[in-house]
Image (spheres, helix red, strand yellow):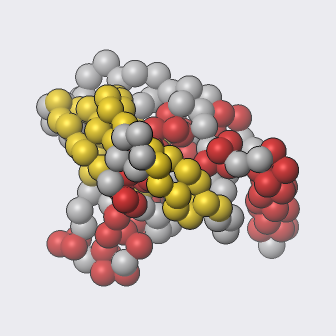
Amino acid sequence: MSILKIVTVPDPVLKSVAYEVAQVDEAIRKQIDDMLETMYDAPGIGLAANQVGILNRVLVMDLESRDLESRNVDNRRPIHMVNPEIIWSSEEWSVMEEGCLSIPEQFAEVERPALVRVKYWDYNGQEQELEAADLLSHCVQHEIDHLNGLRFVDHLSSLKRNMMIRKVEKLTKQQEVL
Ligand code: NI
């Protein structure tokens, strides 16, 4: 397994729509494994393929990942999704603070449907459904947004969005100098 480079804003790959996966084969499983390693290493609770510069509809999540104990493989609860699709969302809304590995150190409240039901293919290519609430609901909607070329800052005012993107650009340039 290898750790991949995480792309940050304003990279255009984060504004691109990812392509459907034809089938879950060894190459896709290797990509899933690498994305998970990258997410645990960051650490983050979700990662979409666009964020590692790959334009296919693959995402990984693990809400336990924020906990240092997730370095212990037994404590990991990874979710792998290929071609995820929201098939139902609640009328009720939820507001939660979100961040993103592609927009480091920036956080903002985002409003989304409180509950969603998602249809997807799992690691073995089997069709699955997941009903998500609370943090998992925000996380899966955030990651599916990535596959559609949307970043969480696209839910904010252009003023806030541009401010955050400029901060990340500045941060990235400083890191390149060091
Ligand atoms: Ni993100």
Residue 99 on image: x %, y %: 58, 61
Q: Quadrant of residue 23?
A: top left
Residue 100 sits in quarter: bottom right
Q: Position of residue 143 (x, y in %)?
A: 46, 45
Q: Quadrant of the N terminus?
A: bottom left
Left or right of 149: which side holds 137?
left
Residue sitting at x 30%, y 81%: 69
**Residue name at image x 46 percent, y 22 percent:** 19
Confirm whether residue 125 shows in the render: yes
Q: Quadrant of the C terminus?
A: bottom right
For this orientation, the residue located farthest to the bottom is 69
Residue under the point 30% across and 50% down? 132
Q: Residue furthest front?
A: 91
Q: Where does residue 121 sit, x and y in percent of width and height?
A: 23, 32
Residue 28 location in percent, x, y? 31, 34
- Please state which of residues 52 and 16 is positioned toward the viewer in this rendering: 16
Relative vertical location of residue 66 with respect to residue 156 in this rendering, above or below: below
132, 22: nearer the viewer: 132
Count up the numbered dots.
0
The quarter of the picture where residue 123 lies is top left
Vertical placement of residue 128 versus 69, above or below? above
Q: Residue at x 25, y 45 (%)?
A: 131
Q: Is residue 5 visible?
A: no
Left or right, 16 with reference to 39: right
